[in-house]
Image (cartoon, helix red, strand yellow):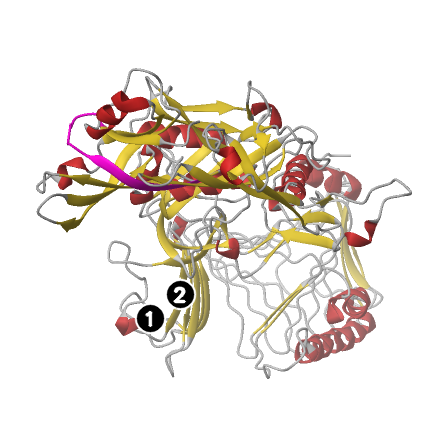
């Protein structure tokens, strides 16, 4: 380029008369360039506010001859392409000074992308790659597909959830690109203007097709009219021995997410003492070991590409960030040339164009430094639980996670898709156990964030609000209540004198009330509304596989759980009574009760509930009642013992059946059997009938007759005298006198028959009775 240049500021919609006095420009990889132009005009009233955000271009053109000077004076440009150009929008206009002859203005030109610095917002992106997210932001600002371009050398992992929180779109894009090792630079197109080019590999660097750049250190006037580098210094920086990353992913808690790189050289001649040790990173949030290794490699490449950095100056107008240039002098550090990272440009009416730059060896993969701060959320944010359509109950996934709607999210999502699955922090948790009360749609929750990262929310608390009021109002300040969505509840009352616990469900009004039992108005339920109540409108069951003690005996709260000493003593006393009566019955030649078996069961099974038994005891009595029937059954014995009377009363019939014998024994006061109405029948259906008394025996009929009949023989005898009726004959015998104290009438033979009751000679088999009982069938006659 010649020693003199012309500079032009061109507007797309306006045509002010401007003459560029000077300019300065700064540009670098992964940032927007900024060109400041100072210009003069004879017009002191340019509508500067109208120029803001308008398309414009700043050009550098060679100046050749008088014609070019005239053209430059009028701010016009030739039809030839400029030597260098920056396109974009005007982001700042200033009127610096006004004089009689001219007015000095200053304009700032930046790419259209730079306008995104002023768009701060908060929003969510779900299930997209970083290139997809960046493209979505560009489209949101009206950029078309020709305004930006992606050059990718690898597949990018899909990010489940990305949050832009109080962050400008410009910073948001920069941050994502830095995290994925994506660089970007700008191309200037005659038709499309400034175009953002994204890349991730050395193969995407811009390459010079011309001759190598001349390197003329300390050239001075020798460089006039020639593009060259004036100087180039190379700085070697120490690097770390390697990068280590680690993290934890709760969705695959057993997966090792450790990854590392090693920058040690294996050659024997290598000097690894210049390395500074390992650099460790935590919390990059990879999901898989492959993602962890990618992130580790990107971090290591960011270190390696800054090991050798060149800095220089020159006037080569074709140099631009992310463009590779070769020099006519070789440098062993950069056998493939140098990659420009940043530049500072300047020029004026009085001085020729020049620039300074930094560069790295072009054989290295460039990775941007992670300098854009990630938004950090301190404290909590409110959110509401969401659910899919027609979801009656809580909408959770297999890991117990929820979807929530954040207050700053103004986008529309399908129901239940408003966020990533969000975990709920619990006071207690373990493998398939813990505390979890499912949250329903609309519930307000407080979100906290792992390491303050907006992309990693979790529910740290649940709140009531005006739309979902607290279930403990001010006048219930003594109640501690756990109540579920369906009104299942555990209530614990702390009010002095009314302490109680209530465990209840609305289903069939099943409740357990302990302590002071109250109604819904907090009034005591009856005079005796204290203690405990277990009730339900449905079925009930009390089961204990090792035995049950039901006792009304008073006992200290610190006493033994199965303290049954009083009950056992009472049972043993009853069995002692049974034993003494057994002796009397045995003396009377009656059968014994099976007291020994009961005593053995008491000792071996019931005492301390060594086996699965049931013991009931109450000092003031036990009563059972039913409007229908009661059934008491035992496969072995039923033993009833009372210290006083045992009374059995039946409103209709009293029936007692025994498969073997029926024994009644009264020790001291006799036996009475009376029928107020109806006959009294006593039969020995398969054996003899004996009636015996130590003293007198009386057989009377108060209003009828007495009939004595026998099929074979009737014998009446006393002290040797007898009357025998047999075979139709009457035989009277006496060892002494037979006295007849009445007139004696003797007639001929006569006969009077009597119909004896028909008794079927059958026997009931005990084994058959037991089998019939087990099968629920009728008994079998044998």
Residue drawn at the location 65% of the way across and 81% of the way down: 559
Tell me, yes or no, whether the highlighted magenta stretch contains residue 384. no
Q: Residue furthest right?
A: 268
Q: Quadrant of residue 233?
A: top right
Separation (CA) of disc 1 from disc 2: 20 Å
Q: Residue 629, image x and y in percent?
A: 50, 51
> Viewer-proximal residue, 547 or 132?
132
The answer to whether residue 157 is left or right of residue 65 is right
Position of 155 relative to 256 (above/below): above
The residue where tag 1 is placed is 525
Asked if the residues shown at circle 1 and circle 2 are in contact, with their CB atoms under 8 angstroms apart, the answer is no
The residue where tag 2 is placed is 481
Q: Quadrant of residue 492?
A: bottom left
The answer to whether residue 470 is left or right of residue 252 is left
> Viewer-proximal residue, 594 or 334?
334
Quadrant for the N terminus in the image: top left
The answer to whether residue 14 is left or right of residue 325 is left
């Amino acid at each position: 380029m010649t020693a003199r240049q012309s500079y032009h500021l061109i507007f797309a919609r306006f045509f002010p008369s401007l003459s560029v006095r000077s300019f300065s420009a700064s540009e670098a990889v992964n940032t927007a360039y900024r060109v400041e132009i100072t210009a003069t005009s004879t017009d002191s009233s340019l509508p500067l506010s109208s120029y803001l955000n308008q398309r414009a271009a700043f050009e550098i053109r060679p100046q050749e001859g008088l014609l070019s000077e005239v053209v430059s004076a009028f701010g016009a440009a030739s039809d030839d392409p400029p030597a260098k150009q920056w396109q974009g929008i005007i982001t700042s206009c200033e009127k610096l000074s006004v004089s009689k002859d001219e007015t000095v203005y200053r304009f700032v030109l930046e790419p259209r992308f730079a306008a995104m610095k002023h768009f701060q917002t908060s929003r969510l992106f779900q299930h997209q790659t970083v290139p997809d997210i960046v493209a979505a932001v560009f489209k949101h600002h009206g950029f078309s597909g020709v305004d930006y371009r992606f050059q990718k050398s690898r597949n990018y992992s899909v990010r489940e959830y990305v949050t832009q929180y109080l962050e400008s779109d410009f910073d948001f894009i920069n941050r994502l690109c830095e995290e994925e090792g994506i660089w970007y630079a700008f191309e200037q197109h005659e038709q499309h203007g400034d175009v953002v080019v994204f890349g991730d590999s050395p193969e995407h660097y811009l390459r010079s097709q011309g001759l190598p750049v001349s390197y003329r250190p300390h050239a001075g006037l020798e460089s006039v009219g020639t593009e060259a580098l004036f100087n180039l210094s190379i700085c070697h920086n120490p690097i770390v021995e390697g990068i280590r990353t680690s993290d934890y992913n709760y969705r695959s808690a057993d997966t090792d997410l450790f990854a590392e790189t090693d920058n040690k050289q294996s050659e024997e001649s290598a000097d690894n003492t210049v390395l500074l040790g390992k650099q460790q990173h935590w919390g990059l949030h990879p999901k898989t070991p492959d993602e962890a290794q990618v992130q580790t490699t990107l971090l290591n490449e960011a270190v390696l590409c800054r090991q050798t950095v060149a800095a220089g100056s020159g006037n080569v107008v074709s140099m631009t960030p992310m463009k590779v240039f070769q020099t006519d002098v070789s440098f062993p550090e950069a056998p493939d040339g140098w990659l420009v990272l940043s530049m500072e440009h300047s020029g004026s009416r009085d001085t020729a164009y020049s620039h300074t730059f930094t560069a790295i060896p072009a054989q290295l993969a460039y990775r941007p430094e992670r300098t854009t701060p990630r938004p950090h959320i301190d404290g909590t944010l409110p959110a509401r639980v969401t659910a899919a359509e027609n979801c009656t109950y809580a909408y959770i996934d297999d890991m117990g996670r929820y979807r929530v709607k954040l207050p700053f999210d103004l986008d529309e999502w399908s129901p239940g898709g408003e966020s990533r699955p969000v975990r709920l922090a619990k006071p207690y948790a373990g493998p398939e156990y813990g505390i979890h009360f499912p949250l329903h749609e609309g519930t307000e929750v407080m979100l906290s964030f792992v390491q303050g990262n907006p992309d990693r929310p979790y529910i740290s608390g649940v709140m009531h609000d005006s739309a979902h009021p607290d279930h403990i109002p001010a006048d219930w300040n003594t109640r501690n209540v756990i109540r579920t969505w369906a009104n299942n509840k555990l209530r614990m009352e702390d009010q002095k004198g009314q302490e109680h616990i209530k465990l209840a469900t609305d289903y069939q009004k099943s409740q357990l009330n302990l302590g002071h039992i109250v109604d819904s108005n907090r009034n005591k339920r009856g005079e005796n509304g204290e203690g405990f109540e277990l009730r339900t409108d449905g079925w009930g069951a009390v089961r204990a596989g090792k035995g049950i003690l039901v006792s009304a005996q008073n006992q200290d709260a610190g006493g033994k759980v199965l303290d049954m000493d009083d009950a056992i003593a009472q049972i043993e006393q009853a069995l002692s009574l049974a034993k003494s009566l057994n002796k009397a019955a045995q003396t009377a030649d009656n059968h014994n009760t099976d007291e020994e078996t009961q005593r053995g069961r008491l000792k071996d099974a019931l005492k301390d509930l060594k086996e699965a038994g049931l013991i009931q005891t109450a000092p003031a009595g036990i009563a059972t009642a039913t409007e229908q029937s009661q059934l008491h059954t035992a496969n072995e014995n039923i033993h009833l013992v009372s210290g006083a009377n045992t009374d059995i009363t039946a409103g209709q019939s009293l029936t007692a059946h025994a498969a073997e014998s029926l024994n009644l024994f009264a020790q001291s006061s006799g036996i009475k059997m009376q029928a107020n109405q109806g006959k009294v029948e006593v039969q020995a259906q398969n054996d003899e009938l004996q009636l015996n008394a130590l003293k007198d025996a009386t057989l009377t009929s108060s209003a009828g007759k007495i009939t004595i009949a026998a099929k074979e023989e009737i014998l009446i005898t006393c002290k040797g005298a007898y009357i025998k009726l047999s075979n139709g004959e009457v035989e009277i015998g006496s060892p002494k006198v037979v006295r007849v104290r009445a007139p004696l009438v003797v007639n001929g033979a006569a006969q009077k028959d009597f119909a004896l009751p028909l008794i079927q000679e059958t026997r009931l088999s005990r084994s058959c009775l037991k089998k019939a009982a087990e099968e629920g069938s009728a008994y079998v006659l044998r």
